[in-house]
Image: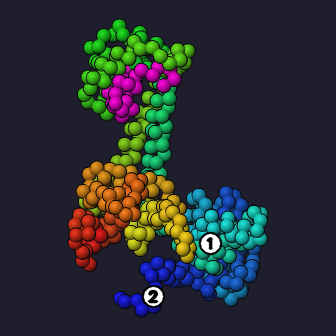
Amino acid sequence: MAQGNGLRRGDRNRNRKIAALREVVARDRAVLAIDLGEDKQAAVVIDHEGRVLARKVVTVKAYQLGGLLAWAAGRAARAGFAGVTVACEPTGHRWKALMGLADEAGHGFVCVQSLAVARAREGDDYTRDKTDHRDAYLIGKLVIRLDCYLPERADAQWARLRHLGARRSALVTDVTACMQQAGDLLGCAWPAPPGAAARPLESVTWLAGMTVITSRCCGHPARLRKMGYDRFKAAIRRELPRWGGKLVYGPVARRLRDALAETGGVAAQRPGALERLHLLLEDWRDLRTRLAATEQRMLTVLDEPGLTALAASIDGVWALSAAVILAGTGDMTRFTSGRAVVKHAGLNPSEHTSATLKGQTRISGRGRPGLRAAAWRAAWAGLRHTTVLRAKYAHLTGRDTSRLAGGQARVACAAAVLRWLWAVITTGTAWDARIAAGQLIPGPVTAAAA
């Protein structure tokens, strides 16, 4: 519909957001703001003029706040309000328990960003004084100004995917830490083995060979030279299935055996470092097994609502990449547009302009770091396998004017992956390369790949 009032898309989206918030933060409801803690909760009931109607401090857990909500509803009724809107900061898991209690009691519920509370604390009287009572009031003050948001209400399936995604993220961190420790230990005590493979920490033959060496050498690798190459290779072959491999790569095994005679590094550190490396390899193998099991669970969750086929329809985006992204976004149907998903990830451009001044444009970086990393990794894989992304990258980096650097172009590709995933999930339509490349205008049903 034509807009004759000069409103931009951002204005219309903002107006819709304000309308949705006003339905929850209704003027006929008082605001119950709670500064959540582990065992002590500070609460304040205020009206829409910022006047404090009541205060209370209770020493209970967050899931035991049902009595406090009933007390606040009674205080609001005495002041002539029809009910209360409950508000808090999204602190840990506590806000979820409070949201459940508010929903059960029929109250509205909103959250206020912790950063907004910190800024309000400084702007209130230009100090950094912090107390529970003051923070509770600042939360309520932000709510009556509609400086709040409606939190996600994830169902059991999406909540499970989020938890699995958090577990996978922790396991990936641990696996990466093991890889870095292994490289550091060998660099100090015995630097020869890493040269046996182009990417030793990704070679199952190298990993199995190092497991054999560190379990038998007792800190002195040269002792294993008496095994001979055939016996050494046979030992690696027996160890290989524990690392998920089937065939020994001969050149790596031979170079690894040759490294047994190499000296170098700090000799005094070698026995202890190799013992520690052996224990580290055991931990590493266990972590890889748990990581694979977690990823399989994520794929199972993704497949239950039939999202695997939709995600896999995007050329070059694997189902696991989609599962990791969706673990960071939750149900994508709650976003009004693909741009909103990009902003949620912090990949949206952040402009700095004023009058004739034009600063450098960067990504905002204000979204979820894990989601941003997942989209970035998906884009790296997509650039190798997706024709549309390769063409987009070439277009962005190859123009004569306003040419982007490689990293900037990859950020744009990561944002495109998020928009595509939002489109196919919200419309339930498979990805179409022609629409994604701008060669076909999407219709009302086939808008998925736009």
Residue closer to the observer: 280 or 305: 280
Residue position marked by numbered label 1 in the rendering: 87
Q: Quadrant of the C terminus?
A: bottom left
Checking the image for residue 6, the label placed there is 2
> Around disc 2, counting alpha carbons within 10 Å, would you say few (fewer than 14), some (14 to 19), or many (20 or more)?
few
Whole-percent x, y for residue 278 in the image: 46, 24
Q: Amino acid at mark 2?
A: Gly
Q: Can you say whether 149 is above or below 267 in the image? A: below
Q: In the displayed structure, would residue 56 be above or below residue 303?
A: below
Residue drawn where x is 40% and y is 89% of the image: 3
Q: Residue at x 68, y 76 (%)?
A: 141
Quadrant hosting residue 137: bottom right
Q: Which residues are magenta?
A: 187-212
> Which quadrant holds residue 386?
bottom left
The mark nearer the N terminus, 2 or 1, is 2
Q: Check residue 153 for magenta coloring.
A: no
- Say which amino acid is labelled 1: Ala
74 to 248, vertically: above or below: below
Q: Is residue 70 visible?
A: no
